[in-house]
Image (tube, grey):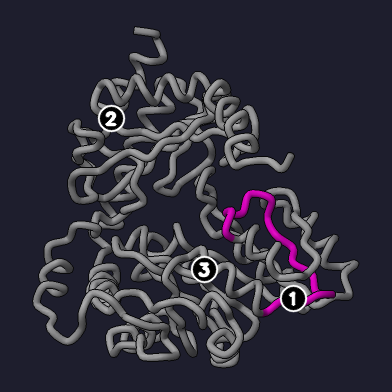
């Protein structure tokens, strides 16, 4: 007898719930900001990637509401009739900002990461990827047809050894800021190894763009590296920009190749023209946001100092992503639920998002968080430590 959907998955669902690994979607009833209504309750939100607090910026909202040149829907793919002037201008403005030849918009970072690897890499090629890369980078590599190998996290000696013995066309793939650990890849070493071994380098800068570098230009700027030749950057708008969507930045040949051959670009409706307009406005704010980046750095330091003083186990992260390591999934879930009861929304991150026995609270900080909100969170964490 052939299986039904229920017979294939119900036992797996039950097992995940029993192991404290079941995940559910919280329901937001307010705009994305530090103080939110989540599941009908007032919560201080420490889960968002809205690093500069732009997701509800009134100037961005006003620009969208004032526009009459486009509807909300693009109506078609970019290559049909969906490529609006706002898309075109956003790509040009991003390219000027990052000092690259071209940029190309995608509806999500996941699609961009699929498109780059699926399009550039062929059977017989090799992708070398950091062990802790985002799931979208892993899936993009698997979809490419190329050989796929992972090197230990940020182990550049191991990467160098693999590059040294490879005679294949090779793409080195890494996040810039790793989304669960919050640490920063050393792009200087990655770039040097790629240059030495004539490899291509592809960096997902989702959590670095807007936060790192001059004018928030991201990780390449942070390491004073150009995005030229066989260097490729993916950036997303759903984090520091406070909007949605993504882009690929690089050479003219790269972008033309994606336009002509990337299935995730060709066969999907373009992002909303009004979202492109909102992102153009967000780009202006990001460029001028040194004050917000300063507030963000101060908030990160405030949290880390307080957490370390009370003996919490933090990872070595200077980014807005601050993991509190608890290791056991049941403990992480219990702490998360206890914080919710006190009005703090903090996610428990468990397997399979992270490795087994690496469960944690993933606390993310924003320039919009107040000193009192951070201090109150630290106080509640202190109560959990002493078991009150």
* Front one among 161 and 135: 135
Based on the displayed image, in which of its 4 quarters is residue 292 positioned?
bottom left
Residue 344's tag is: 2
Span of residues in magenta: 120-136
* Front one among 80 and 126: 80
Based on the displayed image, in which of its 4 quarters is residue 377 positioned?
top left
Classify mark 3: helix, strand or loop.
helix
| C-alpha distance separating marks 1 and 2 | 45 Å
| C-alpha distance separating marks 2 and 3 | 32 Å
> Residue 133 lies in magenta, yes or no?
yes
Q: Nearer the viewer, mark 3 or mark 1?
A: 3
For label 2, count other residues whose C-alpha is less than 10 Å away and answer few (under 14), some (14-19) or many (20+).
many
Classify mark 1: helix, strand or loop.
loop
Residue corresponding to mark 3: 111
Q: Position of residue 290 (x, y in %)?
A: 27, 63
For label 3, count other residues whose C-alpha is less than 10 Å away and answer few (under 14), some (14-19) or many (20+).
many
> Residue 299 lies in magenta, yes or no?
no
| C-alpha distance separating marks 3 and 1 | 23 Å
Q: Tell which circle, 2 or 3, labels the residue nearer the N-terminal end.
A: 3
Residue corresponding to mark 1: 199
């Amino acid at each position: 007898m052939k299986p039904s959907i229920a017979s294939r998955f119900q036992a797996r669902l039950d097992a995940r719930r029993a192991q404290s690994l079941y995940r559910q979607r919280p329901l937001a009833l307010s705009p994305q900001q530090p103080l939110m209504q989540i599941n009908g309750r007032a919560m201080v939100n420490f889960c968002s990637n809205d690093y500069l607090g732009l997701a509800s910026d009134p100037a961005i909202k006003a620009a969208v509401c004032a526009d009459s040149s486009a509807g909300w829907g693009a109506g078609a793919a970019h290559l049909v009739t969906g490529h609006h002037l706002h898309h075109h201008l956003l790509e040009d403005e991003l390219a000027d900002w990052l000092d690259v030849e071209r940029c190309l918009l995608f509806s999500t970072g996941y699609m961009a990461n699929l498109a780059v690897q699926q399009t550039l890499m062929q059977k017989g090629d090799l992708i070398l990827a950091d062990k802790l890369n985002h799931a979208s980078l892993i899936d993009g590599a698997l979809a490419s047809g190329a050989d796929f190998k992972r090197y230990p996290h940020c182990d550049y000696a191991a990467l160098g050894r693999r590059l040294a013995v490879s005679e294949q066309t090779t793409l080195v793939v890494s996040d810039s800021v790793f989304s669960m650990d919050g640490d920063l890849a050393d792009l200087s070493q990655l770039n040097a190894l790629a240059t030495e071994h004539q490899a291509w380098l592809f960096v997902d800068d989702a959590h670095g763009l807007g936060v790192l570098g001059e004018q928030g230009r991201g990780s390449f700027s942070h390491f004073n590296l150009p995005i030229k030749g066989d260097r490729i950057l993916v950036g997303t708008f759903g984090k520091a920009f406070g909007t949605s969507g993504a882009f690929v930045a690089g050479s003219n040949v790269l972008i033309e190749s994606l336009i002509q051959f990337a299935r995730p670009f060709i066969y999907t409706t373009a992002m909303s023209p009004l979202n492109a307009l909102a992102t153009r406005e967000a780009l202006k704010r990001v460029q001028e946001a040194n004050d917000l980046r300063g507030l963000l750095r101060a908030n990160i330091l405030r949290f880390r100092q307080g957490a370390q003083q009370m003996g919490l186990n933090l990872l070595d992260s200077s980014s807005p992503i601050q993991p509190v390591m608890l290791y056991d999934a049941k403990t992480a879930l219990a702490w998360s639920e206890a914080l919710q009861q006190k009005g703090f929304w903090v996610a428990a991150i468990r397997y399979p998002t992270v490795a087994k026995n690496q469960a944690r609270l993933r606390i993310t900080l924003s320039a919009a968080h107040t000193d009192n909100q951070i201090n109150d969170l630290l106080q509640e964490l202190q109560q959990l430590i002493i078991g009150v």
